[in-house]
Image (cartoon, helix red, strand yellow):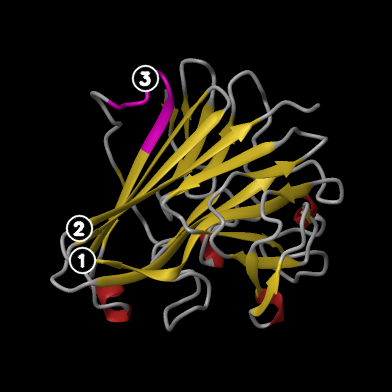
Amino acid sequence: MQTPSTPATGLTLTGSDGARLVASAFGGQILGWTPAGTDVDRLWLSPLAAPVHGALRGGVQVIFPQFSTRGPLPRHGLVRSRPWQLLPAPAGPGSPDGAAAVRFEIRDDEQTRQLWPHGFTLRIAASAAGDRLELRLEAVNEGEDDLDFTAALHAYLRVGDTAAASVEGLGGHRAEDNARAGAALRLPAGSLPAAGPVDLAVREATGPVVVRDPVLGDLTVLAEGFADRVVWNPGAGHGLADVPEGGEREFVCVEPAVLHPYRLPPHQTWTATMTLLAHSPR
């Protein structure tokens, strides 16, 4: 089942078990995810989210073909503040039976080629059933030359309060502190605080990451095809126009990412996935 949408409110899809997705063709973005049997959206969407800010603050943003300011393109690339095409729901073998599901696609055009002279197709598919949200990102090189890009799924994970939440699974990894001009460091063993300011690019981190939250319940982040992870929260006094005062206490971003440029040969396809698992409060 689905209901009509605007960019900021999104298209709502409900699975046979009651799991819900909210998605927007603006940015090809997943705005909300409510696991079956609950009434708590486990993705955070700012109440101030609007296209006027250039992207919708929250949910899961698609970052492509440049992460952050690591290159000459606009911050976080070319696709998170552009309209995507809604594709027909998947059918046949491999389709999510009874799940809330949605697919979007975007292709290069005259505007993107002025900034980045490459042909590409980018698709994202999302499905929600039970306690699980699955996302699949696919990039196709439509040109005749190799395509170098970085990418991420910029996921805003809702927590009861960042003061009580933590991030586990990244201890001991090499990282870059983006808040300190990319200074290299080795993360200490154990958990990381969810409260900001924090902006860590964690290298070669392919295992599970768990957001521990005693209020809403833990979230496990799994990913394949993404070599790195990013942990971000702006902290108090952030000055972001589309995050209300105190809003930073309601989320932490854990982002599967490709931070070293990936080289995709002509007419080849790159695929990566992210899975979120919701757990009940202990």
Residue pushed farthest left? 144
Mark 3 nearby-residue class (10 Å; few <14, some 14–19, many ≥20): some
Per the image, is 88 magenta?
Answer: no
Q: Amino acid at mark 1?
A: Pro
Give the image location of residue 185, x and y in percent. Answer: 70, 74
Residue 88 relative to residue 38: left or right: left
Image-based side of 69 in relation to 174, left or right: left
In the rendered image, which quarter contains the C terminus? top right
Tell me where the magenta segment starts and ends, as one range: 94-102
Q: Amino acid at mark 3?
A: Asp
Q: Which of the numbered marks, if any, corresponds to residue 265?
A: 1
Circle 3 sits on which residue?
97
Q: Position of residue 110 (x, y in %)?
A: 23, 73
Mark 2 element type: loop
Q: Which mark is residue 72?
A: none
Q: Position of residue 183 (x, y in %)?
A: 67, 80
Disc 3 is placed on an element classified as loop
Residue count near mark 2 (Cα–Cα under 10 Å), binned few <14, some 14–19, many ≥20: few
Eye-nearest disc, 3 or 1? 1
Q: Disc 2, disc 1: CB below 8 Å?
A: yes
Per the model, the C-alpha gap separating discs 2 and 3 is 28 Å
> What's the residue at 73%, 50% (across, down)?
167
Figure disc tally: 3
Mark 2 and mark 3 lie on one chain; the one further toward the N terminus is 3
Of 41 and 267, which appears nearest the observer?
267
- Residues at circles 3 and 1 in contact by the CB criterion of under 8 Å: no
Q: Which mark is residue 268?
A: 2
Under mark 2, the amino acid is Gln
Quadrant of residue 149 within the rendered picture: bottom left
User: Is residue 131 rendered to the left or right of residue 257?
Assistant: right
Residue mark closest to the camera, 2 vs 3:
2
